[in-house]
Amino acid sequence: MEARLVGPGPFRATRLWNETIELFRGGMPLRKHRCHFKSYERCFTASEAVDWLHRLLRHNQNFSPEVTRTQTVQLLKKFLKNHVIEDIKGRWGKEDFEDNSHLYRFPPFSPLKPYPKQSQFRKEIIKFPNWDGIEKDTFQEDIPMKPIMLNSEMWFKRHSIAIGEVPTCRLVHRRQLTEANIEEIWKSMTLSHLQKILGLDSLEDVLDTKLVNPKHIIQNVYHINKQGVVILEDKSKELPHWVLSAMKCLANWPRYPDLKQPTYLGFERDVFRTIADYYVHMKEPLLTFQFFDVFVSVLGLLQKETLAIEALQVCCLLLPPENRRKVQLLMTMMARISTNKDLPPLCDTVGTRALMVQTFSHSILCSKDEVDLDELLAAKLVSFLMDNYQEILNIPCALKAAIEGHVAHLRRVQQIKYPGADSDAAVPAPTFCHQISTDEFEYQRTNGCQEPLASLLEEIAKDAEMSIKEKKKKLKRFQKSYPDVYKERFPTPESEAVLFPEKSKRKPMLLMWAFKKPFQPFQRTRSFRM
């Protein structure tokens, strides 16, 4: 049974759990074992299970090649607790699995976990705000809403192009964007971009969008130093000075300029232990509990490195600024320690890189509720972060440019107004749409359009100052644009002819020379002279 890549989407942790169980049950070799002078069919020892599952996880593209044997034992403990396996006497439910020669077997029923029927988050559509669609509560003051009644003058001005005339107009700037409007634009466009990268129809199953704070996004983008690290406005949320000093010491080993105290054998291990103790005892991981599912969902894109980096860039923008700053400093330290050949080994049994992943994975990513694969998922994410932390913790330039361009466009948008029209008074456009009945729609369609057009046609017909030629020209264009309205006003040619009374035609005077014979040229007569 070949391993399948579990892509991004809702309940990815549950899907990975079921996938791992299916691979383990379908591939784990079973054979006959003897224990206490008794034979047991189709079972395996604890050490055999650790060997086989460890090899499976290291070569599975859903996990990291850096999965340790200890992490494999922890996973088998969860298997025993959830009755994925049981001992040869049928006992399960406790995490007392150890890497030894005890015998275990598979239970006869399927231990797969069901998927939740309903999302843990309330369904909410990501709104893409524009100037004509900004929610009412985003303004600092309530805007009175009244229906726009269009009279004949308004219709004449709006439909002047159709009848061949454009009245004088002026440009009026729209209402200025408020800070709340700009924050809503940043939030909506950022979440829409993330949803597009993940290829999901909705973010509702991986992220509660109501918990996303747009102020955090804006601060993470603009309040940064030359190295791209977030600058905190509240200095009380900074890392303690002694922790920051210890991190700088190991990150720049052995060229740390502020190191004044004498070093001793094992000094670097004590410094590392001090840093690890601080992060391990944090109440919440740096990527926060609320963003656990969305970061796990991004893990399904790691085979497409560029896409995964772009998704993690956006996800890290959602973090509180103090968390993003701690992640930036911690990942920088971890990456430098892992590649520093001058730094003495920090552990005798584990390599430096593996030690970094094991020590800080749980401090970076974990779930508030117990998730069976959270340790393996966190290790895979941290490994990817260490390899690409400089790109991931940078600001996504394309997204920033798109949002800034959209905001700039809304600020310079103008609208056309006609002088003297009743729309000169500031009447805002409706901020939302609501459903109406069929009868109401038919009434609005008939009375809301036909009556103003009929009044406009009547004004054209009764305009005494307009020349007959111009009037005929406008009536002809009106008839072409609105034939139904025109036919109702002028049902017959006779009714139209009333507008243009015929003038009495005077006969031209007859000229006397018209009755004369046409001029005949002179003809020479014959001469009678001899």
Image (cartoon, grey):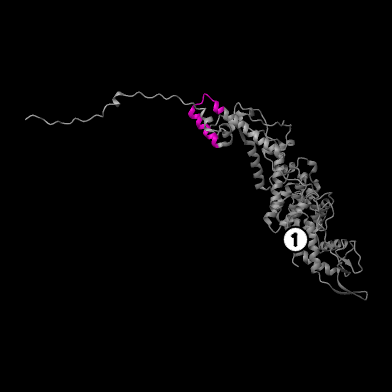
Residue 417, can we see it? no
Q: Left or right: 495 with respect to 88?
A: left
Is residue 381 something that shows in the picture?
A: yes
- Residue at 61% x, 30% y is 154
For the C terminus, the quadrant is top left
Question: For this rendering, which residue is in front, 272 or 453?
Answer: 453
The picture places residue 353, in percent across and down from the top left corner, at 76, 59
- Residue displayed at 65% across by 33% down: 447
Which one is in front, 485 or 121?
485
Dot 1, crowdedness within 10 Å: few (<14), some or many (≥20)? many
- Tag 1's secondary structure? loop
Residue 273 in picture, x, y percent from top left: 83, 54
Q: Is residue 56 above or below residue 183?
A: below
- Dominant SS of magenta comes to helix
- Say if the magenta span includes residue 454: no
* Magenta-drawn segment: 459-480
Which residue is nearer to you in this view: 350 or 205?
205
The amino acid pointed to by label 1 is Asn
Classify residue 521 as left or right of residue 345.
left
Q: Position of residue 297 (x, y in %)?
A: 75, 54
Q: Quadrant of residue 503?
A: top left
**Count the marks: how many?**
1
Q: Which residue is mark 1?
A: 62
Question: Where's residue 71, x and y in %?
Answer: 82, 61
Quadrant for the N terminus in the image: bottom right
Query: Which residue is depicted at the point 71% across and 57% down?
Result: 302
